[in-house]
Image: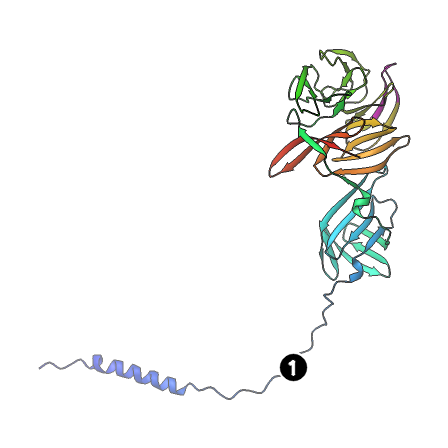
């Protein structure tokens, strides 16, 4: 009979015995005394928003284009601006507000002392005083809804005009035609042209158009499309022409930022209005020049050149404008979901 190997029998027994000894020796000792309390940390600032922030504020710096700030309890924020020409606009956002900061695109630290609001960041400081008479955004800029609409003849924006029966629309670089539109049936006719018209106007007998980025305008036969006369040179990129009902055509150069009072009888410029605006389409009625600029419409006096009313068209951004004696017609573009739509809208101002 064979004898079993000693290691194979006793080695597992020895290992198990040692593990049992170590386990029985592992005891939790008594809990030590509690250490001394550490120093108290600094007291945190208040997280509550100062309710006085929710008010109407008038900016005290008269040289600033920012005139008023409206902050509502629902965190809606409006900034009302007006430039030296009286062109009004507003911006709207939903503000993020803490106990010490307000963010509405830019972020500012804020403080309120009595009735004075201070907004400051590394770039600027704005001081404003509480003023319950501050206009709201609907008083500052008049919102105008569409009465009727139709598609533009082509997928670009140009100025437009009214000849007493039809609307006329330019062609830009898209085609070699000027477009005549029946506003009742919305049918479209056209005449050939050699001009690339961004601006178009009716003077009671003839059409006038700009062409390309040129500095002159052209008298056009509305039946044949032939150019009958070319004006003297004014400023390049004429994108708005407005007939005053007499002998003058107001022509705006987007290149020179100048409106020229062009005398079509003498073929001279009798007056120039310099400005810093990017003006597009224009029309003249009842002693006022209506101007398309920054997607809005401004009703302006010409002497001095000053806006008396500012209009926002809810349908979109305005490029051209004309008046039919009862209503205005505007060419409007709107961007949505990656695409532009182009419409002509009938509105009342």
Instruction: State the image coordinates of residue 82 (x, y, percent, origin top left).
Output: 83, 41
Residue 243 image-quadrant placement: top right
Magenta residues, as a range? 259-270
Magenta stretch: residue 256 in it?
no
Camera-nearest residue between 127 and 30: 127
Image quadrant containing the C terminus: top right
What predominant SS class does the magenta segment belong to?
A: strand
Residue 206 lies, with reference to residue 317, above or below; the image says above
Confirm whether residue 143 shows in the render: yes
Residue pictured at 18% horizontal, 80% vertical:
5
Residue pictured at 76% horizontal, 52% vertical:
122
Image quadrant containing the N terminus: bottom left
Instruction: State the image coordinates of residue 57 (x, y, percent, origin top left).
Output: 83, 53
Residue 286 lies, with reference to residue 71, above or below; the image says above
Residue 257 placement, left or right of 271: left
Q: How is the image coloured?
A: rainbow
Farthest right residue? 303
What residue sits right under mark 1 in the picture?
37
Q: Residues within 10 Å of mark 1 (few under 14, many from 20)?
A: few
Instruction: State the image coordinates of residue 259 (x, y, percent, origin top left).
Output: 83, 26
Label 1 sits on a secondary structure element that is loop
Camera-nearest residue between 152 and 241: 152
Instruction: State the image coordinates of residue 213 (x, y, percent, origin top left).
Output: 73, 22
Q: How many marks?
A: 1
Magenta stretch: residue 265 in it?
yes
């Amino acid at each position: 009979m064979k004898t079993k190997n000693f290691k194979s029998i006793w080695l597992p027994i020895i290992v198990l015995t040692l593990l049992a000894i170590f386990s029985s020796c592992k005891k939790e000792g008594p809990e030590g005394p509690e250490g001394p309390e550490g120093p108290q940390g600094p007291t945190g600032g208040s997280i509550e928003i100062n309710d006085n922030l929710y008010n109407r504020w008038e900016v005290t710096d008269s040289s600033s284009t920012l005139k008023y700030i409206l902050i509502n309890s629902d965190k809606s924020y409006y900034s009302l601006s007006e430039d030296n020409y009286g062109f009004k606009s507003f911006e709207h956002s939903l503000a993020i507000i803490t106990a010490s900061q307000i963010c509405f695109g830019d972020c500012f630290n804020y403080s309120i002392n009595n009735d004075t609001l201070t907004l400051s960041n590394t770039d600027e400081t704005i001081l404003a005083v509480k003023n319950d008479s501050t206009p709201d955004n609907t008083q500052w800029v008049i919102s105008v809804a569409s009465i009727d609409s139709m598609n533009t003849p082509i997928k670009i924006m140009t100025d437009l005009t009214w000849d007493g029966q039809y609307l006329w629309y330019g062609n830009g670089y898209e085609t070699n035609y000027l477009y005549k539109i029946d506003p009742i049936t919305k049918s479209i006719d056209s005449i050939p042209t050699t001009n690339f018209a961004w601006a178009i106007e009716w003077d009671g007998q003839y059409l006038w158009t700009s062409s390309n980025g040129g500095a002159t305008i052209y008298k056009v036969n509305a039946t044949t499309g032939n150019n009958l006369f070319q004006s003297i040179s004014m400023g390049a990129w004429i994108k708005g022409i407005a007939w005053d009902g007499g002998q003058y055509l107001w022509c705006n150069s987007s290149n020179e930022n100048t409106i020229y009072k062009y005398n079509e009888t003498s073929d001279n410029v009798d007056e120039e209005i310099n400005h810093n605006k990017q003006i597009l389409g224009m029309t003249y009625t009842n002693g006022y020049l209506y101007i398309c600029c920054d997607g809005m419409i401004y009703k302006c006096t010409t002497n001095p050149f000053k806006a008396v009313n500012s209009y926002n068209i809810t349908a979109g951004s305005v490029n051209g404008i004309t008046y039919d004696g009862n209503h205005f017609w505007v060419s409007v573009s709107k961007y949505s979901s990656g695409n532009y739509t182009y419409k002509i809208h009938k509105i009342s101002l």
